[in-house]
Image (cartoon, rainbow, N blue to C red):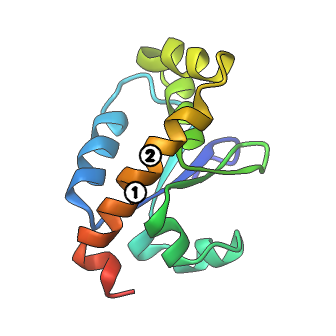
Amino acid sequence: MKSSAHKVFYDDQCSLCNKEISHYKNLEYLHDIDWIPISSSAELLQYYNLSTDMVLRRIHAIRNDGELVSGAAVFALIWSSLTRYHYIGKTVTYFRLVPFLDYFYQIFADWKFNRNSFCSKK
């Protein structure tokens, strides 16, 4: 792990989540994100006072300044960190669209949590 990187906790047991995160991971200009699969990171979750249930229900990240963010704010952070998506992330942040996007993200996250068999076992 890079000490100055953002840490993004993602549901590695969800095929949809994996597909999206794999897309971001494969971008050649990815510099400052550590992708942390939650199924094998119990100690790290505990270190940051996060439960598996919390991060299964909603994506979470620890910014490189130590701030905890979740939901649409994580995607704004990811996009702002990627050369290809930089302007989308900055636009979402500048126009304060995160709360608006977060409303729809929460609907999706609840749906995903309720349909994912890995989540229901926790």
- Amino acid on which the number 2 mark rests in the picture: Tyr
Residues marked 1 and 2 touching at CB (< 8 Å): yes
Front in this rendered view, residue 65 or 2: 65
- Amino acid on which the number 1 mark rests in the picture: Ala
The numbered mark at residue 109 is 1
Q: Residue at (62%, 44%) from the top-left corner?
A: 6
Residue 103 position within the rendered picture, expressed as x and y whole percent measured from the top left: 51, 44
For the residues marked 1 and 2, what is the alpha-carbon distance in whole angstroms? 6 Å
37 above or below 96?
Answer: below
91 above or below 68?
Answer: above
Front in this rendered view, residue 13 or 113: 113
Residue 78 position within the rendered picture, expressed as x and y whole percent measured from the top left: 51, 34
Q: Residue at (57%, 14%) from the top-left corner?
A: 91
Q: Residue at (42%, 75%) from the top-left corner?
A: 40
Quarter location, residue 112: bottom left
72 above or below 107?
Answer: above
Quarter location, residue 77: top right
What is the residue that sits farthest to the bottom in this orientation?
121
Residue, disc 2: 105
Q: Is residue 89 left or right of residue 84?
A: right
